[in-house]
Structures are given as structure tokens and as C-alpha cells.
Image: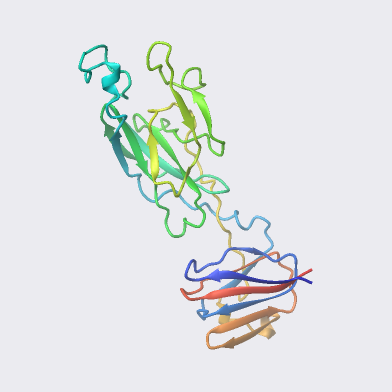
Amino acid sequence: MQIQNLQILNGAVSTTGQWIDISNLVSLSVQINAYTGGSTDIELSNDPNVMIDGSGIGAPGSAPTLSQFASLPGFASLTGGSNSAVGGPPDVSQLPATTFFVKTTYTTKWGETTASASASLAVTVGNYLYVATAAPSATQAPFVTGYNVYVSLTGGAGTWVLQTGPQYQPQRLIDGIGTVGGTVNPLGPASSTHFSISGVIPIANPGFAMVNGFQQTEWVPPATDQSGGTNSGVSASNGAGIDTLTGDTTAVAVMKSGGNLMWSPSSMTWKFLRVTNGGATTVAYLNGQRG
């Protein structure tokens, strides 16, 4: 049989560990070092979707931070217009002055949250809108993989549309003319806009620049939180903390010494296990034999 030794909790990173599949172990024990008596617990579950059956992680906790920056400095002088030394037709290379209303959502590997509160910014002619990455909270961070940006020109209900989608699609190029739902106009005679649709912005990305102006994509924010989240299991100590575990009442053997503990069940009929509510220095290990 193959021996498995796995760290399943590191309190310096998170005080609650991830669910571990133990269905292929014929025997196991859990060692908890520096446990916090009365609160540290072992949870068990047979729910095959325990990692995603919990309530969603919730929308970004604050409205997005918006700013603007100049587009292609000096380009206008090459195309004529008000900045050209020789004059000419209006400069069509610049985006018009527009007030944008912006919301963001988080994405996880299971789905997308509802939208945040909104923010607005009056972007001057020729400038691009910039949306800074919304930092997730400590409880959201383990699950967030990216974010989406939704923009409205009025801020009214039903007017918010996705600017960073389609969700979960590989990057590709879309023509500004002839795109279903598109409103991009040609830049000049026989010209077109060619812009990238890149999908969800990775959470590590510093922000999103809306360099192609507002796109009427027709994708709207989710009406309900579809992001999923870790579900709770059954407490091995009836929710009273691991100090209460005894061989007589829970069919497990417990050894404690100086804040360390070993939990060795005599039999196991559960599929998933995790350690919860550890302290900052709590570390837990799963030891077992594969069948």
C-alpha cells in the first residue's frame, strides 16, 4: 500500500484548510500541531460537490477605482484636425468625451459573482478609461481567479454590459464592423476598428484599459451569485471543538501533548475531510494508506 503524508492546514496562510478527498484511503490519521483547544475542529462530508455547494463568495466589497489616461500622444498631428499644424478635417482618431459608469464582478473556477457598487468618471476627449483591479477580501481571495468589468453610459438599470468578455473564451480578434451587437464605427473611409476580446481579467493584472471605447456587447451582470463556495461538513466533535474528542463517544483515539493532537478513527465512511478554525501557528497533516 502507498503511504500518503500531506499538509492540509497552514495557519499562516489560512486558518481553515481546503477539503481533501480521502475516499481512497483505507486508514488515516490527522496530526494537528499548535491547535487552539475548543475551536479547532475536523469536518467530514460525503457531498461530492462540497467544494462548490456553499453560498457564493459575494460581490467586490467596494465600487471600482477609475482613472483616465491619454490615448496615443502625438498621433492626432499626423491625421489632421485641431492639433494639426496644417489644419484639416476633425480628428477622428480620438474617442469622444464620455461619462462612464462602471461595476465589477469576481470570477471563480465555478462561476461569477453579482456586481459591485458603481463608480463613474467623466473621461475627456481622446482619453481612455482605466479600471483598477478590485482587491478581494481575505475570505474571497482563495477563490477569486479574475474579474469582469461592466460599463453603462447612463448608470440606469438594464444598461450595464460586459466589456471584458465573453467569459471563459480564448482570446481572438473581432471586427468592429459587422459584429453582432456591435456599435463600433469606422475610423475613416474604408477603415475599421479591430480589437481584442480577451475574456476575464486575471486578478493579478493591475487593471483594465478600455482602449476601444464602449462596446455594446449585450452581456449583462449575473442576477444571482454563481461563484460557488466551500460548503460546511459534519463536525467530528459535534461542533464543540477538538478538545472534546474521546474514544468512547466518537469512536476515535485522541492523543494530546503540549498543544499537539493526533486523531485516529477506527473506521472511516467519509469522502472528504478538512481542519477548520486553527490559529495562526496551527499546522495539520493527513497521514494515510491508499487502498
Query: Which residue occupies the foreground of this view, 125 or 262?
Result: 125
Left or right side of 109 for 266 = right
Let me know if residue 15 appears in the view: yes
> Quarter-wise, where is residue 17 in the image?
bottom right
Q: Is residue 21 left or right of residue 56?
A: right
User: Which residue is painted at 25% across and 29% down in the image?
Assistant: 124
Q: Does 194 sit left or right of 48 as displayed?
A: left
**In this view, 114 is above or below 18:** above
Q: Position of residue 84 (x, y in %)?
A: 23, 18
Tell me if I can see residue 40 in this picture.
no
Q: Please provide percent x and percent y for residue 173.
A: 52, 28
Q: On screen, 225 above or below 150?
A: below
Q: Quadrant of the C terminus?
A: bottom right
Compared with 159, 114 (above or below) is below
Q: Percent from the top left, x then y, of residue 110?
A: 58, 48
Give the residue drawn at x 39%, y 48%.
Answer: 134
User: Looking at the image, which residue is at 27% across and 12% down?
Assistant: 89
Q: Name the residue nearer the viewer: 198 or 44.
A: 198
Residue 220 in the image, given as x and y percentages of width and height: 47, 34
What colouring method underlies this structural image?
Answer: rainbow
